[in-house]
Image (cartoon, rainbow, N blue to C red):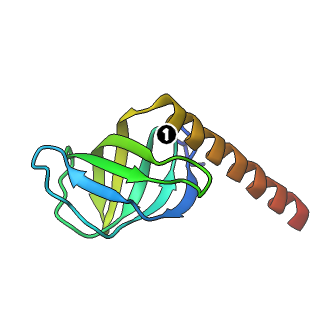
Amino acid sequence: MIIEKRKHRRMDISSEPEEFFNIKTNNVLSRKGLLKNISEGGAAISTKGNFNVGDEIFVRFKISDNKDKVDTLGRVVRYDDSVLGVKFLKIGSNSRTDIADYVKTKTGEKLLVAALNS
């Protein structure tokens, strides 16, 4: 049995960050990346670049076409196999609600498909 340590449920997503840079140096870390999954508390971003655990980064992205852009300050908590684990440190309440709604909707859709296929 696997024990889930995360505080928030994650859901797969495929979205390219619009902006992505190191706060301390103000250097663009990577212009290419892909959000792999997301939760109210953080995200996994597939990318190549120079990252260290503890780096604070700014990330701007959209979770869907009909939602506003999400601007967040995050901390790199994991970096391996070209995937960053980012914990959100600052994120607007509307953005957090949009992410929660996205995860809830996608989780419901996933459960419905599983039920229909069983």
> Which residue shows up at 69% across the image and 53% down it?
106
The answer, for residue 117, to whether it is visible in the render is yes
Is residue 113 found left or right of 25 in the rendered image?
A: right
- Residue 39, position as x, y percentages in the image: 52, 44
The quadrant in which the C terminus is found is bottom right
- Residue 61, position as x, y percentages in the image: 43, 54
The answer, for residue 7, to whether it is visible in the render is no
- Residue 114, position as x, y percentages in the image: 81, 61
Relative depth, front residue between 4 and 9: 9
> Which residue shows up at 34% across the image and 50% down it?
59
How crowded pointer 1 is (Cα within 10 Å; few <14, some 14-19, many 20+) is rated as few
Circle 1: residue type: Arg
Q: Residue furthest top?
A: 93
- Whether 51 is drawn above or below 100: the answer is below
Is residue 33 found left or right of 9 in the rendered image?
A: left
Is residue 55 found left or right of 109 in the rendered image?
A: left
Residue hosting label 1: 6
- Residue 45, position as x, y percentages in the image: 38, 60
| SS label for mark 1 | loop
- Whether 50 is drawn above or below 57: the answer is below
> Which residue shows up at 54% across the image and 42% down it?
4
> Which residue shows up at 62% across the image and 53% down it?
66
